[in-house]
Image: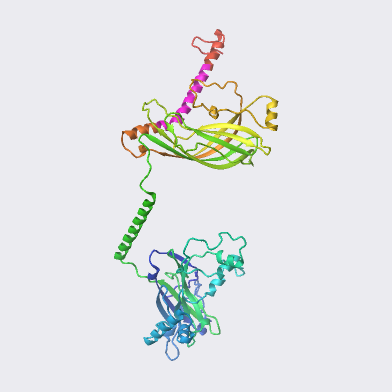
Amino acid sequence: MAEAAWSTDTGEAVYRSRDPVRNLRLRVHLQRITSSNYLHYQPAAQPGKDLIDLATFRPHPTASGHRPDEDEEEEAVIGWQEKLFSQFEVDLYQNEAACQSPLDHQYHQEILKLEDSDGRKNRRIFTYTDSDRFTNLEKHCQKMTTAASEMPSFLVERMANVRRRRQDRRGMEGGILKSRIVTWEPSEEFVRNNHVINTPLQTMYIMADLGPYGKLGYKKYEHVLCTLKVDSNGVIAVKPDFTGLKGPYRIETEGEKPELWKYTIDNVSSLAQPEEEEREQRVFKDLYGRHKEYLSSLVGTDFETTVPGALRLFVNGEVVSAQGYEYDNLYVHFFVELPTTNWSSPVFQQLSGITQTCATKSLGMDKVAYFSYPFTFEASFLHEDESAGALPEWPVLYCEVRSLDFWQRYRVEGYGAVVLPATPGAHTLRVSTWRPLELGTVAELRRFFIGGSLELEDLSYVRIPGTFKGERLSRFGLRTETTGIVTFRLHCLQQSRAFMESSSLRKRMRSVLDRLEGFSQQSSIHNVLEAFRRARRRMQEARESLPQDLVSPSGAMVR
């Protein structure tokens, strides 16, 4: 039966695990496929079959009938950061005079213990741990594409020359900064040390000594079979990936007698027992519970609630922009007027504000000034009148747009008002504005040359003032001119016990909230009905002014 084809995908695979990395176990199987005389032999390809079976390159017995299986094939099960010595390291660390660091002396003692026992089990497969002085030259010449003429970029070169931090390093104690936050003139060394992704990690290399018979222990025959990287977040990077159902990987040595090797990498980590999984779940559940209690302790239990029958309104707003005005360098003066009945605000609360002066920019046919000026306020409504006919009033937002030029000339650009939304959530309001208009050329010349114009003494006169007690508010003789539009963005929050209580108070408060929510709708309906009444009155007046012979007995006009 033909074996699987070669696996050419030697890219890096990334895994994430919550288990301790010390439980990781890999099985590496290394086998020599052919020597130099078989490497150049390629059997004729069969029709419809492009790949050559690996069974074709299996080594055959020698003339004497001897098959050196011990040197042809090797398998090892390796744990995370498990040290397997190569023949070169054994020859090096046997001599105590060659040991310089404490790690070298530790390796010297371990090799002596191996010699006293049955010796090392591995011959060709060995490992380099995170503590070893090993530099993988392949990662210094990594390519980002498959192009043969690729030139490494600046960042690739810098990343190749920077060593990653080890995971066991600890930061300096204390909260005092040891260096400046901003380096205005960074040196090349500073860029090389900081312009890289420098996540702490540990690295391990699984190597193979692919030297010919009797020539093990030479650095030039060492090849990297697999690279493992693990960071503190439980991310495991394996290059190349586990073999699994794919074919084995291939290594072809160079030299006078090139040889072909194949190897596989399998994850043989033991699965957790049901008892261990249950214990782990209990530990995580207890950990999450403690974390939840910690967060609750930070919030506290002294949550401020409203009094019964009250509604608290929070508004986080923003003066977004103003557009369509005659002059440049605009600023907005705004304030919130609370109804005189049942509404109140904290003493420290500021219900007005002035934006910064902002220059305009052209947007289509209009000039727009973007303020992005934030403001916030809160108010409380206490319901006292429980009669069904009582309709509560809602706060009103007034705004005044002014301009200021280079010569410190002030001009009123427009007044506007809008009722705050009665429903919680995000709202975008576009307020149309107007300004008083004084007829005549002199007034316009005065406005252009020296600034100044007609102004309202009371801004609430834009709408119906809260202090007005009459039945009809007359604006007869007030000439106005439509100007631009001011855009507000509001985020409204409402707090009340009626949202969580299930008593008669909840029903009473809900009726109030329903009326508050329907306030704007009722106002719109009232305006429509009033318009119909005015139209009907004009029709009646027109009918009365017509001659009697043009009116039928039923009251209809006759053509």
Tell me, what colour scheme is on the image?
A: rainbow
The correct choice, above or below, for 170 with respect to 385 in the image is below
Nearer the observer, 518 or 452: 452
Q: Magenta segment, principal secondary structure?
A: helix
Q: How many numbered marks, from 0 up? A: 0
Report the magenta residues as a range. Answer: 514-537
Nearer the observer, 104 or 491: 104
Position of residue 272 in the picture relative to residue 84 (left or right): left
Nearer the observer, 66 or 518: 518
Screen quadrant of the C terminus = top right
Q: x, y percentage for residue 510?
A: 37, 34
Query: Residue pushed farthest bottom?
Result: 64
Q: x, y percentage for residue 382?
A: 39, 32
Query: Residue pushed farthest top?
Result: 549
Q: x, y percentage for residue 129?
A: 45, 75
Is 91 part of what is drawn in magenta? no
The correct choice, above or below, for 551 with respect to 121 in the image is above
Q: x, y percentage for residue 64?
A: 43, 91
Q: Can the viewer see residue 69? A: no
Q: Residue at horizontal 50%, vertical 80%? A: 222
Q: Can the viewer see residue 302? A: yes
Screen quadrant of the N terminus = bottom left
Position of residue 323 in the picture relative to residue 299 (left or right): right
Q: Tell me which corner region of the image, top left, top right, bottom left or bottom right, holds residue 235.
A: bottom left
Q: Residue at horizontal 56%, vertical 43%? A: 372
